[in-house]
């Protein structure tokens, strides 16, 4: 796929362009997994209540 030239502007530092590309790829992958109904997608993980272990050290 061709990167969005507005978002991945050549005037940005290389590390920012790479970070933007990775973010876009992660978003596309999450959308694809969700569309296919694959278990364990990001939205399902956000809905799960966090479990604290009983042997957790005090803060």
Image (tube, rainbow, N blue to C red):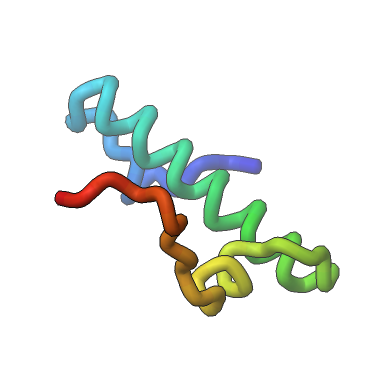
Q: Where 39 sits versus 23, above or below?
A: below
Task: Say which quarter of the image contains residue 25.
Answer: top right
Q: What residue appears at the point 26 percent right and 32 percent down from the top-left corner?
A: 16
Image quadrant occupied by the N terminus: top right
Q: Is residue 58 left or right of residue 45?
A: left
Between 54 and 13, the one nearer to me in the picture: 54
Q: Is residue 32 left or right of residue 9?
A: right
Q: Where 7 sits versus 14, above or below?
A: below
Between 23 and 54, the one nearer to me in the picture: 54
Expressed as whole percent of the image width and height from the top left, the position of residue 30 reads 63, 59
Q: What residue appears at the point 41 percent right and 49 percent down from the top-left corner?
A: 55
Expressed as whole percent of the image width and height from the top left, the position of residue 11 reads 18, 30
Q: Is residue 56 left or right of residue 28?
A: left
Q: What residue appears at the point 37 percent right and 41 percent down from the top-left corner?
A: 20
Q: Is residue 22 left or right of residue 14?
A: right
Task: Say which quarter of the image contains residue 13.
Answer: top left
Expressed as whole percent of the image width and height from the top left, the position of residue 32 reads 73, 61
Task: Say which quarter of the image contains residue 33.
Answer: bottom right
Q: Where 59 sits versus 20, above or below?
A: below
Q: Where 57 sits versus 54, above or below?
A: above
Between 10 and 56, the one nearer to me in the picture: 56
């Amino acid at each position: 796929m061709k990167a969005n030239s507005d978002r991945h502007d050549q005037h940005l530092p290389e590390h920012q362009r790479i970070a933007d590309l990775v973010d876009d790829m992660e978003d596309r992958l999450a959308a694809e997994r969700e569309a296919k109904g694959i278990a364990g997608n990001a939205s399902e993980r956000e809905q799960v209540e966090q479990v604290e272990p009983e042997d957790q050290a005090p803060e």
